[in-house]
Amino acid sequence: MRLRVGALALLLLLFVHGGGQQAAEAGGDAFVRVQGTRFVQNGKPFFANGFNAYWLMTFGADPAQRDKVTSALSQAAGAGLSVARTWAFSDGGGSNALQYSPGCYNENTFQGLDFVLSEARKYGIKMILSLVNNYDSFGGRKQYAQWAREQGQTIGSDDEFFTNPVAKGLYKNHIKAVLTRVNTITGVAYKDDPTIMAWELMNEPRCQSDVSGHTIQSWITEMAVHVKSIDGNHLLEAGLEGFYGASSSPSRRSSVNPSGYQVGTDFIANNQAPGIDFATVHSYPDQWLPSLDAPSQLRFLGAWLDAHIADAQAVLRKPLLVAEFGKSRRDPGYSGDDQRDAVFGTVYAKVYNSARAGGPAAGALFWQLLTEGMDSYGDGYEVVLRQAPSTTGVITTQSRRLKGLVRAFVRARKVQRGKTGKGAKGGGN
């Protein structure tokens, strides 16, 4: 990929003035950091072209299935993917759960997550680990609310997970257990492991009992302080889908939120909470707007991303990650993988165009990656790279384009240093 000299200079200028100069000069830092509206690693811009695979820990804990973890990560690396998002939770629900009762952990399941991180390290893939689910699957806040009831708390709605001191305390204990875990394969504590890119407070937090967003705002603020008190190395994000709330104008909410959705989150205020390092957005027009045809859903997708990219730049001044997106092949109107490719292409174009201009869009993670022999895990959104040549082509093209931006930055930096060196030499004569 070639960029014009002017574009190279702009890329370097935006990176330096965005706070990247110190990182560029320091180098050697394997952790992903935030500088302005960019991710950086080892003194260079870092772009998160990746995938979701919630199942990794479960398969990693089963010796008969571990090869699927290795296969998925190997294939992902071969497609140039750099980030995977997965669950670091499985609460209640039997002996194979990660946390089968408050503070009690299945060592075999934890070793499954150890294995995932070890394999990700081998293949150069960074991990985003989500710490609890909003939904009932894998326990979620419902399980924490039930555990609090079992400890004598009077809890009506599961939404009290966000406010009840006992429920919050149980979740804080889980955070500490995961962050301080020492990997049995690598010997590195999770909080010290640069293979982990970021922690996620919750997968898609929602609180329908308080649509103002204040309840979740308080919870995010409290939990972010707790995470940062244990781990000062890693980035932190809230897990938001991106719905606008009370801090945005009524016209913004009505024009951007699909069907006027209000779920108790606030894209602007929640992402401004101290300790939240970057913003996230999810996008599922086929779920949110099922009555629209595919072209109309695609137009919504473009407008949805445009709004969040603009606000990440002008209001939040933080990187933005499209942490979930996809297209279900089970949709009644699905006519072929060209529809899925169009969705991927739209997301990737928005990310690339923003990144190329020095903007905040820092990557996108599709839902979900599977490998061969996992048919029972298919939900319509799955991508098996070896079985989806056209979609895989779209994915690998994006990987090349984003890596091209990093190479362009390196070239521009060399040019800039050369000019600076000549200037200094000339000034000494």
Image (cartoon, rainbow, N blue to C red):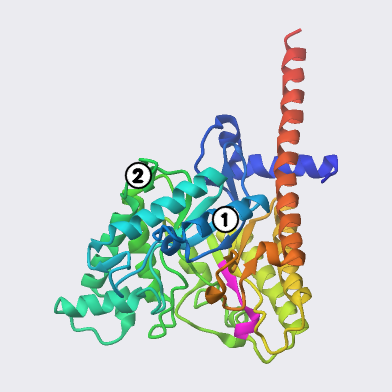
Residue 310, quarter of the rendered image: bottom right
* Residue 298 vertical placement versus 390 (above, below): below
The residue depicted at 47 percent of the width and 43 percent of the height is: 194
Residue in view at x 85 percent, y 43 percent: 4
Q: Is residue 30 above or below residue 55?
A: above
Residue 148, placed above or below residue 88: below
x 53%, y 64%: residue: 53
- Mark 1 and mark 2 lie on one chain; the one further toward the N terminus is 1
Pinpoint residue 14: horizontal percent, then vertical percent.
69, 45
What amino acid type should be assigned to the residue bearing mark 2? Ala
Determine which residue is flagged by label 1: 71
Stretch of the chain drawn in magenta: 281-288
* Camera-side residue of 346 and 384: 384
Viewer-proximal residue, 112 or 29? 112
Q: Residue furthest front?
A: 64
User: The residue under label 1 is which amino acid type?
Assistant: Ser
Provide residue 73's location: percent of width, then percent of height.
56, 54
**Left or right relative to 90: residue 257:** right
Q: Is residue 317 visible?
A: no
